Image: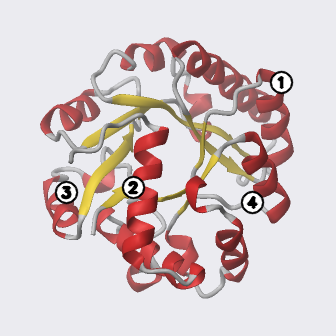
Amino acid sequence: MKLFDSHAHLTDKAFQPGYEAAIEAALSAGVQKILCPCDDVSKPETYTNLLKMYGFIYGASGIHPHEVELGKELEAVKSLLKVNKTQAIGEIGLDYHYLYESKDRGKTVELQKDYFTNQLKIAKDAKLPVIIHCREAWQDAINILEKESYFNGVFHCFSGSLDELDWCLKMGFYVSISGTVTYPSAKNMAKIVKAIPEDRLLIETDSPYLAPQKFRGKRNEPAYVKYVAEKIAEIKNISVEEIAEITFDNACRLFEIKENK
């Protein structure tokens, strides 16, 4: 069984020092490829070293919506595109979850929109897919994407409704499912998973966050992406090997990665 963890934050401080053990565990679990977004484009040394050390780990350059107030430069996003195996712009997007009680909500929302828009332009110019983070900001995200008319990418860790999923699919986006699908409380996720066509489905861990139910409360790791595959296989009533192969091929296609035969 071959697995592709399409979203893992191996440069996160939770994996420091030393992400080697997590990578070895992933290989033992059948994970053959990993997509790792750079968590700090202003200090990319760990990211660039990771991509140089491991041929099966690929990357993405972007400024997360939680970080737009830190003053990170868009030029740093562009510069990382020169790093070999940087295959996407991300993760980028909008997240209003923590802003409802913020006195600076309006200002932060506008800043997130500005960063999202400008990073979409970078992706369009570079002809790269985008990895989109969208949480409680769907209409604004849709409006921006339609205005920029750029629909090449994936909504990672999908948490939207069936209507929002329908829009994503109509526009040509891929949809990625994380360990949240294994949570007993995530009953709506089964409907979402059933509605995602096989050729648009990706799987991820979003590690070190959102560990599957079996490891909830602990650090998530790329090795645990197999539990996401198992749950999706159960929901779709097909074998886990089929889900692994389908999502592996989809991720390779989206990120333009040649599969090693």
Element class at badge 1 = helix
Please tell me whether mark 2 or mark 4 is closer to you in this view. Answer: 2
Q: Amino acid at mark 1?
A: Lys
**Residue 159 figure quarter:** bottom right
Q: Earlier in the sequence, mark 1 or mark 2?
A: 1
Q: Residue at left 36%, top 43%?
A: 36
**Residue 176 figure quarter:** bottom right
Judge whether 146 appears above or below 5 on screen: above
Q: Do the numbered discs 1 and 2 sit on residues whose CB atoms are within 8 Å?
A: no
Q: Amino acid at mark 4?
A: Gly
From the image, tell me which residue sits under label 2: 248
Q: Earlier in the sequence, mark 2 or mark 4?
A: 4
Mark 1 → mark 3, Cα distance in angstroms: 39 Å
Q: Amino acid at mark 2?
A: Phe
Residue 161 is left or right of residue 154, and the answer is right
Q: Earlier in the sequence, mark 1 or mark 3?
A: 3
From the image, tell me which residue sits under label 4: 160
> Which residue is nearer to you in this view: 137 or 57?
57
**Residue 147: image tag:** 1
Residue 67 is left or right of residue 170, and the answer is left
Q: Residue furthest front?
A: 261
Residue 128 is left or right of residue 99, and the answer is left
Element class at badge 3 = helix
